[in-house]
């Protein structure tokens, strides 16, 4: 017989592989967005934290959670968005950083954001590993990324900003 704790853990595992809609090589678990799953008042309550307050992907992620659990005949689902504590790039798993780099997005190089965009900060190119890079724009293809150019291989790439 499956206990409630085992079932709740299974629900967590089923949804942990949901890809981020904007960066499909990493999951909501890799990002640290998937905070908790609990059974409360007859519902599975899934708590997620957006990477940004107005992240446009949140509705899609919520729909995917409901869809994935529906395929397992779980329909009593409530998705809670929590903004406290605020999401931080410190929650990115090591695996997520490796996946980002392989995908061509430079992961944050440190856990503290105090040095981001400072003169001494150098972003490493995810393609050729050069640290001769230049900031093009503090805003990249999405709000969570900045746009850079590698001065050696000449490729343009995104940096997943720390925050």
Image (cartoon, helix red, strand yellow):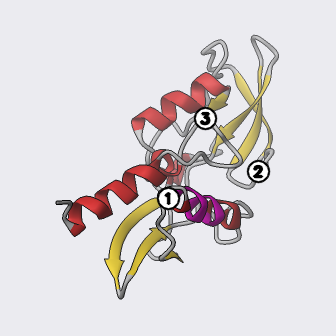
Q: Which mark is residue 20?
A: none
Q: Position of residue 104 (x, y in %)?
A: 68, 26
Q: Nearer the viewer, residue 20 or 7?
A: 7
Q: Relative to 126, say whether 19 is above or below.
A: below
Q: Which residue is mark 3?
A: 25
Residue stretch in magenta: 62-69
Q: How many residues crowd around disc 2 within 10 Å: few (fewer than 14), some, or many (20 or more)?
A: some
The residue at the point 73 percent across, 44 percent down is 146
- Which mark is nearer the camera, 1 or 2? 1
Dot 3 lies on which element?
A: loop
Q: How many residues crowd around disc 3 within 10 Å: few (fewer than 14), some, or many (20 or more)?
A: some
Q: Which residue is mark 2?
A: 142
Q: Earlier in the sequence, mark 1 or mark 3?
A: 3
Q: Earlier in the sequence, mark 1 or mark 2?
A: 1
The residue at the point 76 percent across, 33 percent down is 148
Quadrant of the rendering where the C terminus is positioned:
bottom right
Q: CA distance from mark 2 to mark 3?
A: 15 Å
- Say which quarter of the image contains residue 26: top right
- Say which quarter of the image contains residue 45: bottom left
Q: Which mark is residue 33?
A: 1
Please state if 56 lies on the left or on the right of 64 as rendered. Answer: right
- Which mark is nearer the camera, 2 or 3? 3
Proximity of marks 2 and 3: CB atoms separated by less than 8 Å:
no
Dot 1 lies on which element?
A: loop
């Amino acid at each position: 017989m499956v206990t409630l704790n085992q079932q709740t853990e299974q629900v967590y595992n089923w949804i942990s592989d949901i890809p981020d809609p904007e960066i499909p090589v990493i999951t909501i678990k890799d990002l640290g967005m998937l905070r908790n799953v609990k059974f409360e008042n007859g519902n599975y309550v899934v708590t997620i934290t957006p990477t940004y307050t107005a992240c446009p992907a949140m509705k899609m992620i919520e729909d995917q959670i409901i869809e994935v659990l529906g395929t397992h005949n779980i329909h009593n689902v409530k998705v809670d968005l929590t903004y406290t504590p605020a999401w931080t790039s410190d929650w990115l798993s090591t695996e997520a950083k490796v996946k980002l780099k392989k995908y061509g997005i430079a992961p944050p190089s440190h856990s503290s954001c105090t040095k981001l965009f400072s003169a001494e900060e150098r972003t490493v190119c995810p393609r050729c590993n050069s640290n001769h890079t230049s900031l093009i724009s503090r805003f990249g293809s999405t709000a969570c990324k900045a746009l850079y150019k590698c001065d050696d291989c000449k490729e343009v790439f995104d940096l997943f900003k720390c925050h």
